[in-house]
């Protein structure tokens, strides 16, 4: 089992100084803002006072201290058009250096949101959020267990007979990515795909004549973006049989001379042509709850084995921050959890206890968010180690209105910061829909909170000892409120 360590508080000073950026908002056709951009995101000055920033992007003062023990946050995403504001339903930002002409002409100035609490909308509403509107034609929720059971196709077919009963869930993890359906869902996620496209193409000078390694290449879309940006050669690696389709796709698009597709595990492969190091690593490694079934450890292995050692190597993306907030989810909790109390007249509460331990991946209406949102995990891919993925972080969630809390909600943001044109995207309830949605941890018993009351505690996350791609997540929460009083209540969840 990986040892759990407490996540240290991250200082944002260096990043803020590095990223004094102008923000260029991109207008995506069909994107609508349902909230005024002048309300919702908080800036804190050195005195701890809260101010609304007109652009919805968080900027912190260097003297500001987060209430969480872990910190930092990138921006939001949407190619061709979105912003990351909390009360803005869009999701993509382009961040340009202060010295550029675009920056000088920009109408607003901001930096990446780092180590900063976010404000929730103050009034509940029955209106459907932009994320929910986009999901009307698709399944509304995804049990993490169900997501893991997407269509499987045999991986490493030549070895299947030899493995026999020795196959484990790790083998089936790679099988699930052999099926075209999971790649279709990811490719149709424009927030995800277009942010990568824009981050690569807007930094074409960085890619020109460079050697690129695409970790977990899937269909090869990121590899082809890199070639379009001028990469000298791309090595696209995947451990599932989707690599055969990627190879054909590369050939069909006339890029076979620029992209070499390799099947294997990053820990075992050898790059051809005597290549000993690469200039850039690109990867879309994020999973539900950022870390679930993610390839982050594989990316770190690729970094340590292949990325150039002179400090000039680049990882795309290089930053990720996870956030936590609390929500009023009475109706959905009834449908998903309390449902088991009476099923066609039968008592099935034995399954209710099982359901409570399994988080749900779904879209959360931003108007259901009751508290502020605080960072609980900050990842710098250039420096983090596999042991950092087991973390314990303190949090303090302040109620923004009088309401009941039925669930804790987690989401994450990613950013490309170590590049001239910085970009990022968010999976926040307040941003445009992504296939990651949000991760919901339902409480067995709801709590009542008055405005200003605080739900505080710790979250601990670690890989499951039997399968490191699964996660064991524990909370310990306290609330000393007018109507609810709980002290160090333990909550256990399992992402399987």
Image (spheres, rainbow, N blue to C red):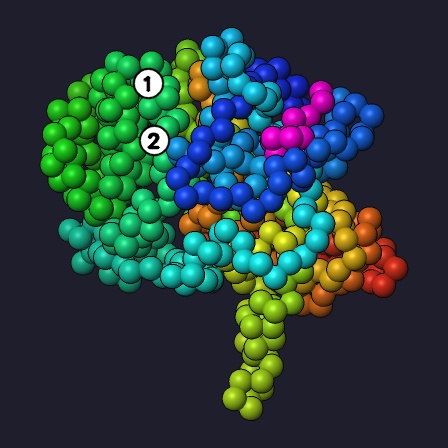
Residue 401 drawn in magenta? no
Q: CA distance from mark 1 to mark 2?
A: 11 Å
Magenta range is: 53-62
Q: Residue 19's spot in the image, x, y percent? A: 56, 18
Q: Residue furthest bottom?
A: 345
- Quarter of the image holding residue 482? bottom right
Q: Residue 317's spot in the image, x, y percent? A: 44, 29
Reply above or below: 154 against 103: below
Asked if residue 473 shows in the view, the reply is yes
- Quarter of the image holding residue 387? top right
Residue 57 drawn in magenta? yes
Reply above or below: 218 against 99: below
Reply above or below: 196 against 168: above
Q: Which residue position holds label 2?
A: 197
Residue located at (44% from left, 19% from top) = 421
Q: Which is more toward the observer, 188 or 183?
A: 188
Reply above or below: 24 against 485: above
Q: Which is more toward the observer, 88 or 163?
A: 88
Indicate left or right for 184 with 354 as reference.
Answer: left
Give the crowd class for mark 1: few <14, some 14-19, many >=20 residues within 10 Å. Answer: many
Of the two numbered discs 1 and 2 on the same chain, state the one appearing first in sequence.
2
Q: Main secondary structure of the magenta part?
A: loop
SS for tag 2?
helix
Q: Which residue position holds label 1?
A: 204
Q: Residue 442's spot in the image, x, y percent? A: 62, 62
Q: Which is more toward the observer, 421 or 150?
A: 421
């Amino acid at each position: 089992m990986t040892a759990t360590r407490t996540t240290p508080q991250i200082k944002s000073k260096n990043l803020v100084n590095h990223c004094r950026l102008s923000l260029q908002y991109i207008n995506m056709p069909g994107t609508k803002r349902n909230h005024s951009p002048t309300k919702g995101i908080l800036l804190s000055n050195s005195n701890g006072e809260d101010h609304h920033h007109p652009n919805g992007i968080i900027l912190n003062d260097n003297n500001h201290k987060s209430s969480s023990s872990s910190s930092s946050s990138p921006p939001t995403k949407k190619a061709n058009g979105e912003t990351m504001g909390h009360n803005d339903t869009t999701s993509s930002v382009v961040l340009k250096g202060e010295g550029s002409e675009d920056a000088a002409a920009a109408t607003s100035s901001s930096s990446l949101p780092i180590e900063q609490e976010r404000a929730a909308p103050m009034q509940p509403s029955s209106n459907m959020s932009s994320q929910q509107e986009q999901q009307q034609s698709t399944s509304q929720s995804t049990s993490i267990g169900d997501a893991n059971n997407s269509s499987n196709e045999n991986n490493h077919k030549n070895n299947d007979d030899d493995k026999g009963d020795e196959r484990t869930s790790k083998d089936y993890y790679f099988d699930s990515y052999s099926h075209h359906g999971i790649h279709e869902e990811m490719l149709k996620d424009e927030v995800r795909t277009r942010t990568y496209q824009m981050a690569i193409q807007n930094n074409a000078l960085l890619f020109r004549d460079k050697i690129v390694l695409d970790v977990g290449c899937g269909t090869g879309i990121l590899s082809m973006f890199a070639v379009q940006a001028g990469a000298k050669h791309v090595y696209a690696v995947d451990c599932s049989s989707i690599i055969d389709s990627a190879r054909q796709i590369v050939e069909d698009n006339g890029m076979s001379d620029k992209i070499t597709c390799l099947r294997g595990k990053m820990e075992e492969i050898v790059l051809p042509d005597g290549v000993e190091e690469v200039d850039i690593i690109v990867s879309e490694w994020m999973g539900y709850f950022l870390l679930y079934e993610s390839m982050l450890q594989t990316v770190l292995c690729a970094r340590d084995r292949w990325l150039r050692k002179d400090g000039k190597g680049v990882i795309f993306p290089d930053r990720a921050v996870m956030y936590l907030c609390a929500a009023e989810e009475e109706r959905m909790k009834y449908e998903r959890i309390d449902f088991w109390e009476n099923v066609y007249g039968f008592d099935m509460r034995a399954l209710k206890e099982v359901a409570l331990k399994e988080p749900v991946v779904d879209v959360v209406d931003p108007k259901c968010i009751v508290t502020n949102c605080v960072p609980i995990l900050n990842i710098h891919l250039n420096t983090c180690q596999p042991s950092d993925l087991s973390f314990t972080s303190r949090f303090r969630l302040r109620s923004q209105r009088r309401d009941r809390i039925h669930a804790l909600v987690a989401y994450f943001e990613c950013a490309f910061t170590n590049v001239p044109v910085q970009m990022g995207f968010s999976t926040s309830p307040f941003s445009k829909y992504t296939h990651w949605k949000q991760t919901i941890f339902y409480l067995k018993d709801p709590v009542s909170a008055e405005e200003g009351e605080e739900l505080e505690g710790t979250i601990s996350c670690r890989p499951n000892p039997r399968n490191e791609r699964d996660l064991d997540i524990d909370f310990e929460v306290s609330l000393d409120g007018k109507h609810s009083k709980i002290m160090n209540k333990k909550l256990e969840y399992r992402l399987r």
